[in-house]
Amino acid sequence: MNTLLSIAKRNAVLSRMAELLEQERANLKSINQQDLNNYSGEDLAMEKRLLVDDAKIDGMILSMQQLASQEDPVGVERFHFVHDNGLKITNKTAAFGTIMIIYESRPDVTVEAGGIAFKSGNKILLKGGKESLLSNLKIVSLWHQALTANDITIDWVEYLNYNRAETQAFLENPTQKVDLIVPRGGEQLIAFTKKHATCPVIVSGRGNNFVYVNKEADLQKALDIIINGKTTNIGVCNALDKVLIDSNLENWEDFAKQLVTELQKYKVEVLGDTAFANATQAPAITNEEIWYEEFLNYKIVIGIVNSDKEAIAKINKYCGGHSASIITTNDAIAQEFMEQVDCAAVYQNASTRFTDGGQFGLGGELAISTDKLHQRGPIGLQHLVTNKWYIYGEGQIR
């Protein structure tokens, strides 16, 4: 087991990492360009996630600086009790030990997720995708420089350059102790990890997020929120895939037509259920199973419901348990919707694109969990801990 590094040491490594990313900015971009050139380009969302440009590097640097300035998540007292017999019993947060992160195509994860795991006192095993290998190896070399500069052994951050078969073998029979695995990527990666892992897995699940336009919606807000959720970044789990419109909305057909027109300006493929297709001449869906799909593409499905209750039931049946938003000026209806929809994040009059550790004030995230154990939604620094009981006695026996 790794001895816990002092918070001063952990912060010094993160601060040094921020400096190195700035110094190596040009190198990192040119190495990333090689990864981009090697990539076949068949998946638009994948390519977007693979790119490292100045904005991405700025984000990486900011995340290191923010992490370095945050409170130590380890050793925080969560419960205190003095027994009748004088035993002093305390529960405190503790590091997991070793955390393995499995991810695809996003070199920024090598920095940000690595930083969150390291700040919370853990050794990190990084298993990135082959498409971003050169970028990842470059970033890991910076981690090693930052560790070495602070007289810390480089095995605190390890890159596992494994193919699929080697990864499976490691998951089933790890060559070193692993306490927690966090897969970040598509449903196939998550299913693969859950199937083969021999230790706990935090599932960073699929999106398939919904917006429900209630009969008391501000329609301009509804339009802006839907366009934002669908078009600003198609390759992320907080993007929007489904819209439900209340048939009790006055002149809903006019709003539906306007929505199609706006979405088509962004080259979004719009499909509808029978009622929506009839009202707008948009193509109708041919299979109800499409309601379960996460698109990660310029594609959206829109349906008509006859009540709030029907909307809630439909969302709970089909969504990925990630994010759902109601557009309404009626706060009581919104509150009921938010309490009854079974998602990690529920919104009133805002875009699902905000489901993100940085946006929620966590200073970044390791993953967005759609599981209910042990933390739901964005997993920040504060959540990447387990806990431990400390009991101080003077010879008490039971």
Image (cartoon, grey):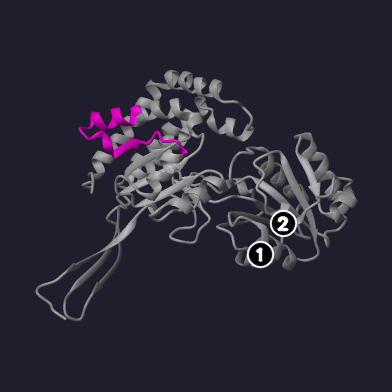
Residue drawn 74% across the image and 66% down it: 310
In the rendered image of this protein, does residue 268 appear above or below residue 225? above
Q: Which mark is residue 212?
A: 2
Residue 183 location in percent, x, y? 47, 46
Write down the quadrant of residue 335 in the picture. Answer: bottom right
Residue drawn 45% across the image and 40% down it: 165
Q: How many marks?
A: 2
Q: Is residue 301 left or right of residue 137?
A: right
Q: Which residues are magenta?
A: 141-164
Secondary structure under the numbered disc 1 in the rendered image: helix
Residue 19 location in percent, x, y? 35, 27
Secondary structure under the numbered disc 2 in the rendered image: strand
Residue 328 location in percent, x, y? 72, 58
Q: Which mark is residue 337?
A: 1
Write down the quadrant of residue 45 in the picture. Answer: top right
Write down the quadrant of residue 15 in the picture. Answer: top left
